[in-house]
Amino acid sequence: MRLTRFFLPVLRETPKEAEIVSHQLMLRAAMVKQASAGIYSWLPLGYRVLKKIEQIVREEQNRSGAIEVLMPTIQSADLWRQSGRYDAYGKEMLRIKDRHERDMLYGPTNEEQITEIFRDSVKSYKDLPRNLYHIQWKFRDEVRPRFGVMRGREFLMKDAYSFDLNAEAARHAYNRMFVAYLRTFARMGLKAIPMAADTGPIGGDLSHEFIILADTGESQVYCHTDLVEMPVPGKDVDFDGDLSPIIKQWTSQYAATDEKHDAAKFVAEVPADKQVSARGIEVGHIFYFGTKYSEPMGCKVQGPDGKLVAVHMGSYGVGVSRLVGGIIEASHDDAGCVWPVPVAPFEVGLVNLKSGDKDTDAAANAVYEKLTNAGIDVLYDDTDERAGGKFATMDVIGLPYQIVIGPKGVKAGEAEIKTRKGGAKETIGIDAAVAKVIDLVTTGRDLA
C-alpha cells in the first residue's frame, strides 16, 4: 500500500483525553477515532490489526473443533426472561423497544441466543458434542468508559458455547478451549497466564481468566515462574485426546491478582526464587456453567437411555478489540507501537527519502514490487514529507521492519534495514536487504 493512497491522519501530539499508553498511541497512530463515549470508529490502520487478531482467533477456534456462526447484535428480551437474567443483569445492558413496543436489547453476551438456536435444532445425544462460536460486536453500557478500547462500551468479542451430554464431556470441551487460548495468545506474541477466576453474572463454578503480562497493565499479577517459562502446546496438539495433563501442568502453579485473589496466599505458597510479580491485562475468560441456561430454557436432548436430559454448557470469550490495546500495552516504547509480526497492520515500512528523484523512486519501486510479490504486507511511504517526519510516522505506527532507500544509498547500491523492536540498524545491498526482510517476516509469522 502506497502511503499517498492510504488514509493515515497521524497526530504529532498526544491527545489530552488519553490516559493510558494504548489509548494515546492508538489515537496518535490514527488507528481509531472516538465517535462517542466508549465507542470508536476503526480507521484503516487499526482495522487491519483488528482483522489480523480476529483471524488468529478464528484459526485457533477452528483448529480446536469449534464451528463458526453469526448471531445478531439485537436480541429479544423474552429470551433473557426465560433464563432469568433480563432483570438481574443490571444497567450495563442497553434495553430498547422497537416500533411495535417490543422489548429488545443490544446483546452484551449470547448465552440465551445460542441456547435457543441449539434447543430448537438438536434433539439427540448423537448430535453431541458441539461448540459454536461467533465474532461479533457487543455493547455494555459502562458507567464510566475509559482507557480507549480497553474499557469501551462497544467492543468486538469472540464468544464460543459448548454443548455436551454430561459434566465429564463438558470438562473436555472446557479443556479444548483452555489449550486453544494458550495457542491463540502465543501466536500474537503474548505471554498469557491462566488464572482461576470468579464466574460473575455468567454463572457456574469453573472459570479461568487469561492475563497477558504488560508493564503498564491494569492489575498486579503474582505467579510462579513456571507459568511464564512453560512452552505452549504446538500445532500437533490432539484436541480429541486427553488434554488433562496439559491443563494440570498449567494450573498446578499458583497465580493471583491483587484485585481478585489472595496475594498473600501466593507469597506464602511459592518459594521466593520462583515468584514473579508483574502487571497484567485480562484478554480472555472461559466458563463451565453446567445446566444454568439449558434447564430454565428447556434445552434438552434424548440420552442413550431414551430419557430427556438438559445439556451441559460452557462459554468462552476473547476480547478481540481489547487485544489491540492489550498488545500495545505489552509492546511499545517511547517512540510508539512495536507490533509483533503476526498482528502488525503492515509487516514492513518502506521509506523513500527523496520521492520525485528518478533513481531513488526506481529503486524504492523495485523493492516495493519484490516485497509485495513475495506476499509481504508493505506500507510504502512515497510522500514528499521530510525524512524526520517519515521516520516519526514509521516509529509511531510500529511496523516490525523498515527498509530505507535514499539517494546516497542508491548510488552505493545499498539500503538500510531497521528492526523496530530494539531499533537495530544494518546497511547492506538492496537485494540482500529485500531477501533478509522477507526471511525475517516469514520465519516469525507463526509458532514453531
Image (cartoon, rainbow, N blue to C red):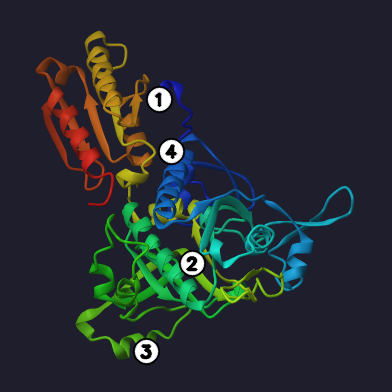
Front label number (4 vs 3): 3
Q: Amino acid at mark 4?
A: Arg
Q: Please give left or right for residue 300 compared with residue 47 in the image.
A: right
Which residue does the numbered mark 3 point to in the structure image? 265
**Secondary element type, mark 2:** strand
Q: CA distance from mark 2 to mark 1?
A: 38 Å
Is residue 244 depicted above or below 75 in this figure?
Answer: below
Q: Earlier in the sequence, mark 2 or mark 4?
A: 4
Q: Amino acid at mark 1?
A: Leu
Which residue does the numbered mark 2 point to in the structure image? 285
Q: CA distance from mark 4 to mark 3?
A: 46 Å
Q: Earlier in the sequence, mark 3 or mark 1?
A: 1
Front label number (3 vs 1): 3
**Secondary element type, mark 1:** helix
Q: Please give left or right for residue 345 compared with residue 274 in the image.
A: right
How many residues crowd around disc 4 within 10 Å: few (fewer than 14), some, or many (20 or more)? Answer: few
Q: Earlier in the sequence, mark 3 or mark 2?
A: 3
Is residue 311 depicted above or below 158 in this figure?
Answer: below
What residue is shown at x 35% (from left), y 30% (from top)?
A: 389
Q: Amino acid at mark 3?
A: Lys
Q: CA distance from mark 3 to mark 2?
A: 23 Å
Q: CA distance from mark 1 to mark 4?
A: 17 Å
Which residue does the numbered mark 1 point to in the structure image? 3
Which residue does the numbered mark 4 point to in the structure image? 12
Q: How far across and down, in percent of the image, does residue 244 sit? A: 34, 74
315 and 101: which is toward the camera: 315
What residue is shown at x 43% (from left), y 64% (from top)?
A: 177
How many residues crowd around disc 2 within 10 Å: few (fewer than 14), some, or many (20 or more)? Answer: many
Q: Are the residues flagged by discs 2 and 1 in contact, CB closer than 8 Å?
A: no
How many residues crowd around disc 3 within 10 Å: few (fewer than 14), some, or many (20 or more)? Answer: few
